[in-house]
Image: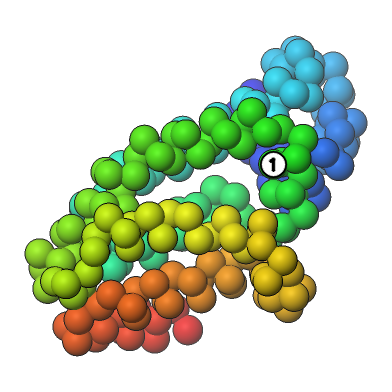
Amino acid sequence: MKEAILNKSLKMFVVHGFKSITMDDIAKEMGISKKTIYQHFDSKNELVKATVEYVYDSASNRMKKISGKCETPIHEYFETRECVSELLGHNIQPSSIYQFNKYYPDLSKWIEDKRHKDFDTTIIRNLTEGVELGLYRKNIDIDFIGRIFFALPSSFLHNELFQESLKMSSLEELNMKFLEYHLRGIVTPKGLEVLEQILKEIN
């Protein structure tokens, strides 16, 4: 039941907002009493914290299974993207992320700190491996490119330049465009063939 509550809460939070969704909403959606939720979580703040930790740990475990084990480092990017989409759903609303960052700043910082700790074993490792395999250009500045890839997605939510884009495209669509942009900037002709094939299969 605890895991079921976490899963349902997560889906509701990312679509309708971390602030907007109440314990009553979750109980009604699940067809259970609010008392049942309080048997596992003392407050909504505790539920939000548990949900964030749950999804991060779930994502991290899946990433470890993917990391370095995909057909190519290029495939790994898309496998990672699909992994996150499966966990969070394909209809993440920017407003939900705004609410999370505004009303739960400590949890938002906790996630960023976690991501920073994984920087070398995820992004830098992928870039290094891609260069070694001849899929990414040898002359790229791996550390610089890695930091750009790490930092830029958050601009979709914090930079006014992207507000109009978010009205016309979903957050997931923008992240997909960014991923393609990132890869086209670093691949070799050999890597481009791999990328084009993946994009063809997705489309």
Residue visible at 59% across and 60% down?
155
Which quadrant of the figure has residue 159? bottom right
List x then y, in percent, for residue 154. 57, 56
Identify which residue is drawn at 40% across, 39% down.
116
Is residue 68 visible in this depiction of the protein? yes
Picture layout, residue 17 above or below residue 159: above
Report the coloring of the rendering. Answer: rainbow
Position of residue 100 relative to residue 157, above or below, is above
The quarter of the picture where residue 108 lies is: top right
Task: Name which residue lies at 84% across and 17% down.
Answer: 35
Q: Nearer the viewer, residue 57 or 26?
A: 57
Name the element at disc 1.
helix
Residue at label 1? 101
User: In the rendered view, does 74 fall on the left or right side of 168?
Assistant: left
Query: Residue 105, percent across and down?
Result: 68, 33
Q: Where is residue 195 in the image (x, y as percent from the top left)?
A: 31, 79
Expressed as whole percent of the image width and height from the top left, the position of residue 92 reads: 67, 57
Q: Can residue 79 be seen in this view?
A: no
Residue at x 54% of width, y 48% of height: 87
**Vertical order, 12 against 79 (above or below):** above
Q: How crowded is mark 1: few (under 14 residues within 10 Å), some or many (20 or more)?
A: some
Residue 4 is left or right of residue 74, and the answer is right
Q: Is residue 113 left or right of residue 138?
A: right
